[in-house]
Amino acid sequence: LQISQPQTAAQKSSYDRTDWQRGYESQPNESDYWIDDIEGEIPAGLQGTFFRNGPGLLDINGQRIHHPFDGDGMVCAIAISEGRAHFRNRFVRTEGYLAEQEAGKILHRGVFGTQKPGGWLANIFDVKIKNIANTNIIYWGEKLLALWEAAQPYRLDPRTLETLGLDTLDGILEPGEAFAAHPRIEKGKNGKGDRLVNFSVKPGLSSTITIYELDESGKLLQRHAHAIPGFAFLHDMVITPNYCIFFQNPVSFNPLLFFLGLRSAAQCIQFSPNKPTQAILIPRNGTDEVKILETEPCFVFHHCNAWEEEGEVFVDSVCYESFPTVDADADFRELDFESVPAGELWRFKLNLQEETVQHQVVETRCCEFPTLHPNNVGQPYRYLYIGAADAPTGNAPLQAILKMDFVTGERQIWSAAPRGFAGEPVFVPRPDAVAEDDGWLLLLMYDAANHRSTLVILDARDITKGPVARLHLKQHIPYGLHGSFTPN
Ligand code: 3ON
Ligand code: FE
């Protein structure tokens, strides 16, 4: 017999608000050193570099950024080899970063609400976009690229993290052409023929999605563009062998207040709970017809995975009840978590013949930042790993990692609560492994007790036994966005 515990307002919180807030202090310093404060042991088979991007500055010389997604990109690289680990962090020297550091003040409006000081008069009619290169970092075609979805990537030196400049991917991108922050890598057969599939969006009254497929050396294999009806805010995409799949969130965009200098672009996006969410399937051959299926309204930033099974397409996504913005007069540090919707894990089943979509709520625990074994991208999969709240209900910061077994339904949790805050996990397969969960999860955790961050290494087969190693950094790294692992 199981008696569920009623949730009460008096229930002890899994975290302290001031602890959480300090993880959003700027980290203006750049450093590099060998990590010597290590608990446990770095697994022998783990060799390569963990790269992670995210906002490094939450203020410009004391002037506050309105939303963490507006913060300048700072890349961390933790290079692991023969049981030793070296840490390095550097800011992406974007045009905007250099100009603002030189001026010592905010010179650009941000997409998510950062305004130039001086009120609307200082911001009116300024529609320039500051490329902050803060969302993801990938090593592909022998280039290390810092990605931000509304602009061209910045190329960095993989060893020194020095900024080499804007990159067109050897002429694939026109100067200024965007390249999204969510590429998917499709594994080739027998370890050969991997492909990087990515996209760009040109939003407008009608929006254009361009698909790019690159081979291992970075050469363009496929490029095609498609107009889709309406304004599109598409942060992520999933692939199957035949499709690129997007969820067109039910939003409308009225940029009047943006032009008038009163709101940022994202603050002009309005969630429309009465419109359906559209699943857009773009055939990867570039010639077959685009399919659009309707499902009920929800807001999606991130998808986990997608696959095809007997004429049906399955998509696992993190779904929100609506689009979360930070109001113009609000401070994100004072966010009332309980007042905004939490991410939940949903599984969608798309029937392409009948043009119907069914969905199932797979997990209601607040979660975000999904990952899986790289071999299963676009394929059926058994295990998903995702950042999660410590408590099973309610909205809260990510403090735990949740492992889902879709075959047995079993769930495992490792939590860093009360004083640890978890970032995106990255799955690294053990060399020569056979089992899908035979590998490690790497994540940066903010350790409020010591106001520093830690690289946590979990054995993905059993995360409940706790980290096999904790590599303590000398400083804190503000909560970040996405990263990747490049084997040696
Ligand atoms: O017209 C507009 C033009 C434009 C440039 C449309 C627009 C708003 C789509 C747009 C730009 C969009 C950009 C630049 C989006 C960038 C997104 C970003 C940097 C991050 C998104 C992160 C998403 C999530 C869910 C993060 C979760 C974080 C946590 C759980 C906390 O640690
Ligand atoms: Fe993302």
Image (cartoon, rainbow, N blue to C red):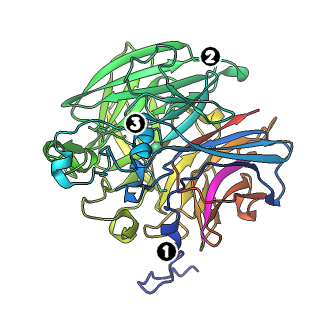
- Looking at the rendering, the stretch of residues picked out in magenta corresponds to 440-448
Q: Amino acid at mark 1?
A: Thr
Q: Quadrant of residue 311?
A: top left
As drawn, 378 above or below 466: above
Q: Residue furthest bottom?
A: 10
Residues 57 and 310: in front is 57
Q: Residues within 10 Å of mark 1 (few under 14, many from 20)?
A: few
Q: Amino acid at mark 2?
A: Ser
Dominant SS of magenta comes to strand
Q: Secondary structure at mark 1?
A: helix
In the image, residue 261 lies at what x, y percent? Answer: 18, 47
As drawn, 92 above or below 12: above
Q: Nearer the viewer, mark 3 or mark 1?
A: 3
Which residue bears the numbered disc 3?
131
Q: Secondary structure at mark 3?
A: loop
Which residue bears the numbered disc 1?
18
Q: Is residue 301 visible?
A: yes
Quadrant position of the C terminus in the picture = top right
In the image, residue 460 lies at what x, y percent? Answer: 71, 51
Which residue bears the numbered disc 2?
217
As drawn, 444 above or below 146: below
In the image, residue 3 lies at what x, y percent? Answer: 53, 82
Q: Is residue 141 left or right of residue 49?
A: left
Q: Residue furthest front?
A: 103
Q: Any magenta on residue 93?
A: no
